[in-house]
Structure formats: C-alpha cells, structure tokens
Image (spheres, rainbow, N blue to C red):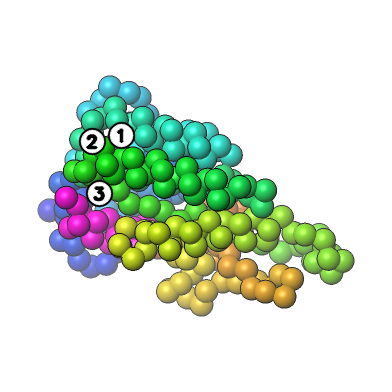
Amino acid sequence: MLNTAQGSGEPDHWQTLCENRILFGHQSVGSNLLDGVTRLIPDLPIHPCDGSGADLSAGINHFRAGENHKPVSKLEHFEARVAEHDGACELAAVKFCYVDIRASTDIDALFERYTTTLDGLIQQFPSIRFFHFTTPLRTLRPGLRSRLKSLIGQPIPVCEDNIQREAFNNMLRQRYAAEGALFDLASLETGAPERPEYQFGYRGTKIRALHPEYTTDGGHLNTLGATTLASALLDFLAEQIKKAP
C-alpha cells in the first residue's frame, strides 16, 4: 500500500501512480514539484533518467529538459526522449520555466512550435496520454526601486514578463483545457483556490503573480508552495491515467 506522509487522505486515489510510467521533462520549478511529491508520498517511485539507454520504470521518470532561456531546446529534447523510449510510457509532458518566457518572447512562434511538436508526438505515439503545463509566474518582491519605477512610469520587468507568460498560458488554456489535459500551474501559483488569488496593480490593470507565501526568492517554490501544488498535481495525474489510451 502506498505510504502517504500527508495529503488528501485518499491514498488509493494516487495508487495508480505507482503502477504506471510517467515521463516528465522539466527544470528547477519541476524539481520543486517533485520535492513536494516526495513529501506527500515517500514511497512513490521517482526515477532520474537524464542519461540515455535506461528503460522507463513505473512511477515518475524525470529529466532536465534542454536549456533554460531556450524553450525550443526543451521541446527538442523532450521529443527525442519520447522517441528514444519508443512511447514506452502511459503519460508524458514537458514543462517550461518562467525564464523561458519574457516580455520579448515571440509567444506566437513558440506556441506554434509547441503545438506542432505535441501534435506530431500524439500522432506518432497514440498509446501515450500527453498532458500540458502552464508556464509558472514570478512575484513582485517589495522594494523601493520597484515602487519608484512605478511612480515615474518606467516598466517593471517582472510585471511585463508575467503579462507575456499569461498571454502564452491563455493560448494553452484555449487549446488544451477543454479536453482536461492542462495542469494550470500558473493559476495554482497565485494561491487559488486555497487562498485569495494574488494580484498586483500595474498600469491600470491587475497582474496575476506567484503568491508570496509560496516562494522565498520570487520564482521557485518553497516547502508550502511545493507541497500544496504537488498535491494538486498528484490528483491531476491520477485523472490523466484514467484517460490514458
């Protein structure tokens, strides 16, 4: 029986995660999520598979996908890893990091590349249930410099970046949410539904951001954030397994 350190009180709900193979490409925020998973379910197998050649095992098989700041490299790496294992898993996903999308990112081109890559994989490997992550957000760390920039009308980079991240995330929501294949990490990072959604005012509008209670550095997840979001991820993965081909 699966050993749950804490969580939903429904260990059987997550039992299938030990019996299926999940392939997950990510970087640092993904590692935060997996740390949370380990706290919640110490007995859930989590296998690093950065090297090539090893067979995938039951549980979560994860690798550091591509390079940060180069989201296309993550898609290329993920595509290669799925092909390398010849579709030998039930679920698979690659997650971008907040550094992959900035105010200057051409999100239309990136979204086209993302959907083209995933559509190709879905066609090539119909036995895999591919799922998707929204891109994580950052929070505005309080400080005199940011307040002064706001007062004199200068752009605040973290605000501009979050606007672009959410624009990309909205594309993902429109494409994948209806089919139940989207883990909306960005929305959960704002605190919803556990607490009021975290926003801040910027140039006459409200910008959603990572809840400050979930982070110590403004971008990565602390213990509270990682555990809270990991619980939601485990529930989501259990539902994905039910929908797998």
Task: State the residue position of label 3.
Answer: 129
Amino acid type indicated by mark 2: Gly
Is 168 on the left or on the right of 243, as rendered? right
Residue 125: x, y in percent?
A: 24, 39
Tag of residue 87: 2
Range shown magenta: 229-245
The reply to whether callout 2 and callout 1 are in contact (CB within 8 Å) is: yes
* SS at mark 1 in the image: helix
The reply to whether callout 3 and callout 2 are in contact (CB within 8 Å) is: no
Amino acid type indicated by mark 3: Arg
Tag of residue 1: none
Residue extending farthest to the bottom is 196
User: Spatial distance from mark 2 to mark 1, Cα to Cα?
Assistant: 6 Å
Task: State the residue position of label 1.
Answer: 82
User: Spatial distance from mark 3 to mark 2, Cα to Cα?
Assistant: 10 Å
Pointer 3: residues within 10 angstroms few (<14), some, or many (20+)?
many
Residue 153: x, y in percent?
A: 83, 66
